[in-house]
Amino acid sequence: MQPFKCTKISVLGNARQCELTLEFGEQTPLSVFTFDYTSTTIRKGKRGVGERMKAFLERKGIQLSAKVYFIDALSAMAIGLFSTLIIGLIVKTIGEYSKLDGLITMGEMGMALMGPGIAVAVAYGLKAPPLVLISALAAGQAAVTNGAGPAGAFIAAIIAVELGKIVSGETKLDIILTPFVTLTAGFTSALFIAPPIAQLMSTIGQVITWSTAQQPLLMGILVAVLMGLALTAPISSLAIAIMLDLSGIAAGAATIGCCAQMIGFAASSFRENGWAGFVAQGIGTSMLQMPNIIKRPAILIPPTVAGAILAPIASVWLRMTNNAAGAGMGTSGLIGPMMTLQTMGASPSVILSVVLLHFVLPALIAFLLSEWLRKIGWIRFGDQSLYSTKQS
C-alpha cells in the first residue's frame, strides 16, 4: 500500500466535521473524505454540486422541509403572537373594564409590536444566529406597516431569516453584511411577496366566515373539528386563526372546537391524570396528549365528537361569535372565553352560554363517550396518561 499525503484540511464549520483532501500515490485520483467526530467514520467519494449545496445548507442550519416551515416556524409564530398581540389584547380588555388608562396604553403598545414579535419568534424557531435574529425585527415591522398583516410578517420573516443565515459568518464583514442582507430581504419580501399572500389568507378567512354564516350547521361542524384538531396537533391554531382573520360565527365555531379539545381531553383523561392533568390540559394545552394520540388514535374521538356536537348549537341557535385572537386559543389561559365575552358582551345569557359550551358540556360529552369507549375496549386505562408520556 502506497503512503498518502494530505493536501488539504478544512473544517466544515459546525465543530463536528472536517474535510480532508488526500492523494494516494500516483494511481489514485484526488478524493474528498468527510470525517465525523461523533461517529468516527470516513466516507470517500467525489461530491457533486447538489451534494455540496446540501452540505452547505446543513452547515447553515437550513432545512427545506414542510415540517420546518409549517409546523416549527408556525408554532414559533404563535409564541410571538401570544407575547404581543394576545397578551396586549388581554391587558387592554382588563383596562377597559377596570377603567385604568395605564393598562389600556400598555396593552395597545404590546399589540403594536405584533410584527416584530412574530419575526423574532420565527427567527428563534429557525435557530437564527444573533445578528439575523435581531435584524429580523425590521422584516416583521415592514410587513405590518405595508398592510401585509400577521401572515405577511410570517412570510417576510422566513425569507429574511433564511437568506440572512446563508451569509452569516461567511465574511470578515459579517457584522455589516448579515444585518444588511437580512434587512434587505425582509423589506423586499414585505413589499412584493407578503401582501399578496396575506390578501389570499384574508380572502380565505372571509370565505370561511361567509360560508359559516350561510350554512352554520355544516360549516360550524367543519370549522370546529378542523380548528380543534389543529390546536391539539403540533400546528398553531392561533396562527391559523390570526392569519385567516376569522371572525363572527366562524370564529365562534372555532372556539367551540378548541375548547372541546382541551376540556374534553382534561375530562376524559381524569382517571389517569387527576386534577393536575385536568388543569394542565384544560387551561394549558391538549397538545400534551400528542404522543398518546400517536400510540392510541381512538383517544381523539371523545373531544372531537364533543366539538362536532356543540358547534351547531353555538352557530345555529345561540349565534355565538368571537374574534381571531380568541378563535384559536380555546380555554388556554381562558383566552377563548374572555374574547367571546369581549366580542358578544358580558350579559348573563352570554356568560351562561360560555360556561356551558366552553366548559361544562364539552367535559360531560367527552367524559361519557370516553367511558363508553373504555367499556368496549377502544380505550384502555393508561392510554391518556401524561405521566407515561413523559417517561417515554
Image: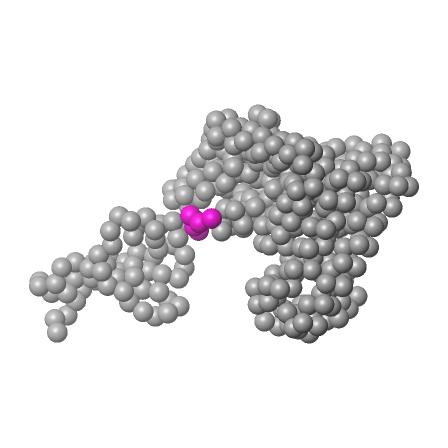
In reply to whether residue 63 is colored magenta, the answer given is yes
Front one among 65 and 304:
304
Q: Is residue 269 magenta?
A: no
**Which residue is at a point 81% across and 36% down the rendered structure image?**
344
State which region is magenta: 61-66
Residue 145 is at least partly visible in this image: yes
Q: Colour scheme used in the picture?
A: one colour
- Pick the residue in front: 86 or 133: 86
Q: Quadrant of the N terminus?
A: bottom left
Picture quadrant of residue 377: bottom right
Predominant SS along the magenta part: loop
In this rendered view, identify the residue nearer to me: 41 or 274. Answer: 274
Place residue 82 in its image quadrant: top right
Residue 200 image point, x, y percent: 54, 31
Number of numbered discs overlaid on the protein picture:
0
- Judged from this view, the residue extending furthest toward the left is 27
Whether residue 41 sits left or right of residue 372 in the image: it is: left
- Which residue appears farthest toward the right when viewing the image? 348
Percent across and percent down for residue 229 are: 62, 52
Q: Where's residue 338, x and y in %?
A: 80, 43
171 lies above or below 363? above
Residue at x 58%, y 50% (from the top left corner): 235
Q: Relative to 223, is 47 above or below?
A: below
Q: Position of residue 321 (x, y in %)?
A: 75, 37
Q: Residue at x 60, y 54 (%)?
A: 233
Please say whether residue 90 is visible from this viewpoint: no
